[in-house]
Amino acid sequence: MKVSSVPFKGTKEQEAKLLEVIAKYKGQKGALMPIMQEAQEIYGYLPYQVQKIISDETGIPIEKIYGVATFYAQFSMSPKGKYVVAVCLGTACYVKGSGAILEEVEKCLGIEDGGCTPDGKFSIEVCRCVGACGLAPVMIVGGDVYGKLTPDRVAGILAKYE
Amino acid sequence: MADIKVTVDNITVTVPEGSTLLDAAHKAGIDVPTLCYLRDINEIGACRMCVCEVEGARALVAACVYPCTDGMVAHTNTEKIKDYRRKTLQLILSDHDQDCLGCVRSTNCELQALCKRYGVEKTDYYEGSKNEFVIDASSPSIVRDNNKCILCRRCVAACEKYQSVGVIGANDRGFATHISSAFELPLAETSCVNCGQCIVACPVGALHEKDSTAAVKAAIADPTKHVVVQAAPSVRVGLGECFGMPIGTEVEGKLAAGMRRLGFDAVFDTNFSADLTIVEEANELIGRVTNGGVLPMITSCSPGWIKFIEHYYPELLPNVSSCKSPQQMFGAVVKTYYAEKKGIDPKDIVSVSIMPCTAKKFECGRYDQSAAGVPDVDYALTTRELGRMISEAGIDFVNLPDEGYDDPLGESTGAAVIFGATGGVMEAALRTAVEWITGQELGKDLLEFKDVRGVEGVKEASYKVGDLEVSVAVASGLANARKVLEMVKSGEKNYTFIEIMACPGGCVNGGGQPIVPSKIKNFIDVREVRAKGLYDLDNARPLRRSHENPSIKKIYDEYFGSYGSEKAHHTLHTSYVARKVNADHE
């Protein structure tokens, strides 16, 4: 599991919300998953500091929380960047070479799929078909769709985002 | 519960309802192989080694968790089953570092034994990826080598269920699954208490103690060093197992002889400082009771327990006795009183302990454990490490003559030797405290406080001592300790004195003791067998009260003055720190 090196920027408000969530589930069996899901909604991801709050408040060992977080793909230990770079690895995009697009994005940003750049600007996540197969291979940056991509265009596209 | 009849490999046995097929097979005299199964704590049927055929069942069943029904017919040893088990072993080997020659568990490895049994002897059954893990040697006590881990989760279960600590678990998923701590933190940076129950739960070489034998051997070989050794009570009912002797064999005399032959300059007994602990602790208890001090007082002998309370119940630290543990008291006496007596600079003394414990390795590096300005104890070895040193030296341990321990720190009473069993410290303390409070000697029948004996996780008793009502509790295993502490915190119970040992059953079952294969410990209670050896020794000792130990009387006359004196406090007492469960990280 790659753990983010992006500094934690949680706010007092987020912490208050999380404590509310934990209080709501207090004493309930099987509460860990919903607490983690709601915590991820609040913070966008589940860094050490967030899992520590859950552990300290519930008495559940932090290792148990981390074990769940690393087992299920729905949980992320890395924050989302200001711009999310989504590379489609659906069948159509993949046969049209989106694997090479992903590699190029990873190379340009110096992070792997699921990671976030230390400045918090970009994060990468792969997706499976965005319904634009006619444009394959497709990448979405901060909501903007780029189609019929080739690896040599990637650096130029990313450079447009400040 | 009603009895039911089950036929296993054509042998019909009667077992209580609720028994598993594994139990029934055991009763029929058949050893069904297991790897992940540990009775009571890890009954997950995951490794598939114990698969058997049950007539009428859809598929092979996991015997360790398969409930018997009346009239059930099962087969444990068909060719189909053996092929299946062989395949399972081959698959485990395909992602296992087969460093058997260099492995600390070689010849005492459950995987190796099963491979041998089923003729799985090649190293290359499957090609493909292998995981590569960095060895975690961050802890002073425990080394984890996940390249040898077979993901049985026995260590995880021990940490969580026996100890309620839960700092290790399965992380990631599928082929990447591995056992580690949250956020891959090194073990030393977690709230691990170093008890080593994970090590004695491990079927293979994925966990072992941090080995200090090389440093000890170097000290022995150094003519400028005076190397002193002490051995804890439980070592004498464990060490024999390293040499094939039956579990719990009492080897007190051979232990002394063996250590002497290894070249230690003085062979002493932690029992001496166990007696010392009792007089200091009984004195502290009486002080707290008569002066309105913080009660209940809780024992402080078990360093795994101490780190646990520092992390999980720091608000109760004032309840913990300030007495150092016997290991540390011993070391402190060696580098002060003994050094003075012998005219040796404490810096030239190397103080070694043999312990049934891995947390002792952490303890000797603790703050406020250096009475002479140098560490009281330099190296704490486990029973297993001593066993390896004796084997390496070619000493025929089984046939060693019985020898005694050296003066002046070798003399001890029966009260000291029972320290190794849960309830032993309590009983020893009561023998002294009751006599001191009442001023009357306890008769032989009253000397034994049997209510606090036995392997139960929590024991309670109440005694009328003079005008005092003394209410005591004894807990072993930190999950049990937690129960007692919660009752103390809530005010549900008002105890006077509590004994807590980190390991279930006490030190006899410590994380540094010889490792008993699961196929044995799933069916006999090792704690009970080893403890019996200690109670037998107590029974045979001419002196059974710590305060009667002539060497103890002498050390107070010559050195400390009185119990709890300023000098005794400086040398024999310590302090604790509050720790967090989850550290703060930026």
Image (cartoon, grey):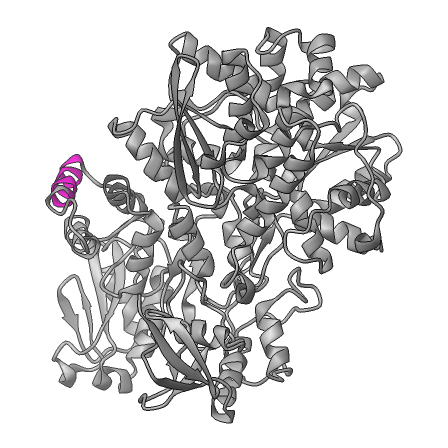
**Foreground residue, B154 or A21?**
B154
Task: Answer above or below: position of B428 versus B121.
Answer: above
Q: Which of the 4 quarters of the picture holds residue B468?
A: top left
Q: x%, y% of residue B355?
A: 64, 41
At 36% from the left and 31% from the top, the residue drawn is B313
Name the residue furthest bottom. B79
Q: Is residue B177 left or right of residue A101?
A: right
Label the magenta part by its dominant secondary structure. Answer: helix
At 32% from the left and 79% from the top, the residue drawn is B69
**Foreground residue, A149 or B370?**
B370
Magenta extent? A12-22
| Rendered-image quadrant of the N terminus of chain A | bottom left
The verdict on residue B497 being magenta is no
Tally the marks: 0
Q: Is residue B174 visible?
A: no
Task: Answer above or below: position of A151 versus B435.
Answer: below
Q: x%, y% of residue A8?
A: 28, 43
Q: x%, y% of residue B311?
A: 39, 34
Name the residue furthest right. B223
Q: Is residue B275 visible?
A: yes
Q: Is residue B494 left or right of residue B283?
A: left
Q: x%, y% of residue A92?
A: 21, 86
**Foreground residue, B112 or A46?**
B112
The verdict on residue A16 being magenta is yes
**Foreground residue, B348 or B381?**
B381
